[in-house]
């Protein structure tokens, strides 16, 4: 059992948890909790190393045993060590370092969401979860958007990142992609453009959602073909980015007959 927070592996995990550059450099992500580890295991992500505590639930222990069967290095640690490496106040008793992988993107794109300068991990995670549920094929993050694989974003997304293709692209790459795929680009604005439910979302499209503080960038407006908005009353000027995204994403799904 590892009991010291100064253990090299413990220090390694702490660096990975705290710094996006460390994770990118090593090509890994860190998953905490039984549910995220289950998502990774069931989606065939490669678990490179995991730690767990004696307090782990039977469901979690069964999962650890499955990982051990396929020769994943798993080590028992003290509760104190788990608290030291965890990004949560109440760790579930299991944490895994998982090899990053690039998910395949469909050759023919017709439903893409572009997230521009989303800086709150919770908002990004919630949008990714909604995007997966609404049938989005690809999520593109433009420069200035928070790391989709940070601990907080992974928890907020409930593991959506493990099944939904997510790419970081510069705007010139975005323009090339939407042109090549012949996507109509809609940008969600406040009070401008067409009312969202009056738009034709049957056609191949990309939807741009701007950031919480300043909205979409000037470049996003240049790329957009049309502006759309969500009507609001009661003196409300704007909605949370994840709420706006959810409303628009499921309007597309509704029109295409995919909502449940």
Image (tube, grey):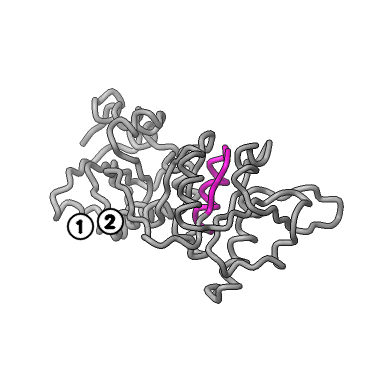
Q: Quadrant of residue 29?
A: top left
At numbered mark 2, what does the secondary structure look like: helix, strand or loop?
helix
Residue at 50%, 61% in the rendered image: 111
Q: Quadrant of the C terminus?
A: bottom right
**How many dots with numbers?**
2
Residue at 53%, 59% in the rendered image: 130
Pointer 1 local density, CA inside 10 Å: few below 14, some 14–19, many at least 20: few
- On the image, the x and y values in percent for residue 5 come to 31, 26
At numbered mark 1, what does the secondary structure look like: helix, strand or loop?
helix
Q: Residue furthest top?
A: 6
- On the image, the x and y values in percent for residue 235 come to 86, 51
- On the image, the x and y values in percent for residue 61 come to 26, 55
Residue 251 versus residue 187: which sits nearer the camera? 187
Which badge, 1 or 2, is on the more N-terminal residue? 2
Pointer 2 local density, CA inside 10 Å: few below 14, some 14–19, many at least 20: some
What label does residue 66 carry, if any? 1
Q: Quadrant of the N terminus?
A: top left
- On the image, the x and y values in percent for residue 259 come to 55, 73
What label does residue 168 carry, if any? none
Residue at 67%, 41% in the rendered image: 215
Which residue, given by chain and number where applicable, does mark 2 sit on?
41
Residue 30 versus residue 238: which sits nearer the camera? 238
Q: Are marks 1 and 2 in contact (CB under 8 Å)?
A: yes
Magenta span: 113-130
> Does the magenta-highlighted stretch encompass residue 125?
yes
């Amino acid at each position: 059992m590892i009991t010291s927070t100064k253990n090299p592996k413990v220090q390694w995990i702490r660096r990975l948890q705290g710094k996006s550059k460390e994770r990118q450099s090593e090509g890994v992500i860190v998953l905490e909790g039984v549910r995220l580890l289950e998502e990774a295991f069931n989606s065939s992500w490669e678990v490179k190393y995991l730690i767990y505590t004696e307090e782990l639930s039977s469901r979690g222990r069964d999962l650890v045993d499955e990982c051990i069967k396929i020769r994943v290095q798993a080590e028992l640690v003290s509760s104190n060590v788990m608290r030291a490496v965890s990004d949560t106040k109440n760790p579930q008793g299991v944490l895994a370092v998982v090899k990053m992988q690039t998910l395949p993107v469909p050759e023919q794109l017709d439903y893409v969401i572009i997230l521009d300068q989303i800086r709150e991990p919770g908002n990004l995670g919630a949008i990714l979860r909604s995007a997966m549920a609404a049938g989005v094929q690809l999520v593109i993050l433009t420069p200035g958007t928070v790391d989709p694989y940070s601990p907080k974003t992974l928890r907020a997304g409930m593991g959506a990142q493990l099944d939904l293709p997510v790419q970081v692209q510069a705007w010139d790459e975005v323009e090339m992609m939407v042109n090549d795929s012949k996507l109509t680009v809609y940008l969600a604005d406040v009070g401008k453009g067409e009312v969202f439910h009056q738009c034709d979302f049957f056609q191949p499209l990309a939807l741009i959602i701007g950031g919480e503080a300043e909205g979409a960038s000037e470049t996003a407006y240049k790329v957009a073909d049309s502006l759309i908005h969500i009507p609001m009353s009661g003196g409300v000027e704007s909605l949370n980015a994840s709420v706006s995204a959810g409303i628009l994403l499921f309007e597309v799904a509704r029109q295409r007959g995919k909502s449940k």
